[in-house]
Image (spheres, rainbow, N blue to C red):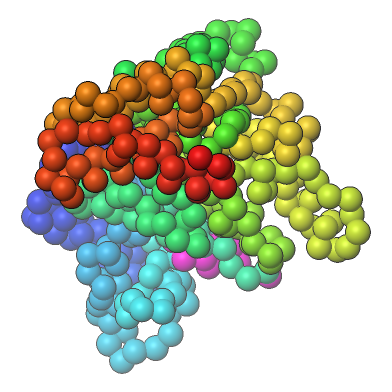
Amino acid sequence: MLYTLHKNIIPSFAVESAMNDLRQVITKRMQSHFDKNVFGLEKWVKENFNGSLIKQDIAKHLPKLPNIDEWITLMLTMVPHIQPDFFSSIITEHLPSGGDFPEFGGVKANNHRGLLPTGETVQFILAGNDIENRLHIQQLFSEEHFFYRYGILWLEPVKEGEPVMSGRIVIGQDWVDKILLDKETIPRFGLDFPAKKITTEMIWDDVVLNPQTMTQVNEISNWLQHHHLFEKDENLRRKIKPGFRVLFHGPSGTGKTLTAALLGKQFEKDVYRIDLSQIVSKYIGETEKNLESVFRKAETKNWILFFDEADALFGKRTNVQSAHDKYANQEVSYLLQRVEDYPGLMILASNFKNNLDEAFLRRFHSLVHFPMPNSTERLLLWKKSMPAALKHNVSVKLEELARQYELSGASILNAVQYAALCCYARKDSEIHQSDLLDGIRKEYLKEDKSF
């Protein structure tokens, strides 16, 4: 379970209080180092902070941290975001003439002019030269620790051969915003994060789906509502892997993306869309790298992931004819495993199910077909799509349009939008059949269909 944060923006005096506490801890360690005295951090904290380093004001705004080591580690990572010269000012107090101080760790960044803490910084402050304790501190940065699992903070990878703990400590920007501003941050779309949040103002009543499709969508709703009970079942929790994988397949405009957005809206989960056709890289390994940041953040946030154009990456694997084919197939194999290991709801969408690799299809819990709507469903779509503020001219015959023209839900909405714009342009309060027919003609031309 993710840690609960206070709902108010953290006051400046609470930040100052926490930073002053941290400064005292670092100063005490520095004095101990230069005076060559043994410094028992836990005992000293008990004596000087009445058993708890975490002051009441700051505690309301931080995750509930089990021990002092974790609190200090989080604060060490936070302070460069508040006071750039925090570390350098403390070091200068003890080395006024300058000089190198490798024991403290820390690295310089490209833009940031101050010192950024590394794992070695944490080791020095918490353990000094105590080898056993320094080794113990490394556990704070293991993949099993909640810091990593919840995407709070982690060590930046270093070049092969360099000490792992010399890596810079990175704190997730979303946690910086939560702690300091009480604000949820939406990740910025880009090469490093190739996903966009999708939302909708529509409700389920706006949707017209084939009855069989709706039944399968309800099965997904059942999983979202009840899957946590598997963990409480002594038998099932050992045998059922976390997560639910679904394929939405069918022509464009039949409601695949909208259904994903509505599931997120219903269960108050963020839905992030990844268009695989836009990120498949010609450079070996880049696609995997681009997606890894999405997977990691999604796992900590319990997002619904919606992969569009899934056949662009998960299509039938090629016969190995070159080194590129070999690595491309390895990349797909890795991502197939990543998909299978995702603990939340993952939806992949494709216009053509037959384009997908059979090994991939076997990994799905459900294959949901979104067919083109029949005439009855099209009539419902026409009725639900018509503008509320415009009257229907006597010429409008929606039954005739539904019967004669095979259109998807998205195409019907586009045709209605075009017709409404025609009315607004001529300052008419009535929508005409001819307006709707012109809209249909435009949709047919898009698909190279004869009207």
User: Is 451 in the magenta?
Assistant: no
Judge from the rendering whether residue 117 lies leftward or rightward of residue 20; answer left or right.
right
Residue sitting nearer the eye, 417 or 218: 417
From the top left corner, tell me how far across and down residue 441 is, in percent: 44, 42
Which corner quadrant holds the N terminus?
A: top left
Find the residue positioned furthest to the bottom: 97
Q: Quadrant of residue 411?
A: top left
Residue sitting nearer the eye, 268 or 347: 347
| Residue under the point 63% across and 71% down | 159
From the top left corner, tell me how far across and down residue 147 is, in percent: 44, 45
| Residue under the point 79% across and 51% down | 329
Judge from the rendering whether residue 406 lies leftward or rightward of residue 198; answer left or right.
right
Find the residue positioned furthest to the front: 395
| Residue under the point 51% across and 29% down | 406
Query: Looking at the image, is 346 positioned above or below residue 70?
Result: above
- Visible in this render: residue 108? yes
Query: Looking at the image, is 50 positioned above or below residue 34?
Result: above
- Visible in this render: residue 135? no
From the top left corner, tell me how far across and down residue 429 is, in percent: 12, 36
From the top left corner, tell me how far across and down residue 174 is, in percent: 33, 50
Q: Quadrant of residue 161?
A: bottom right
Q: Could you tell me how many numbered marks the image carries?
A: 0
Judge from the rendering whether residue 265 lies leftward or rightward of residue 22; answer left or right.
right
Residue sitting nearer the eye, 68 or 312: 312
- Residues in magenta? 161-169
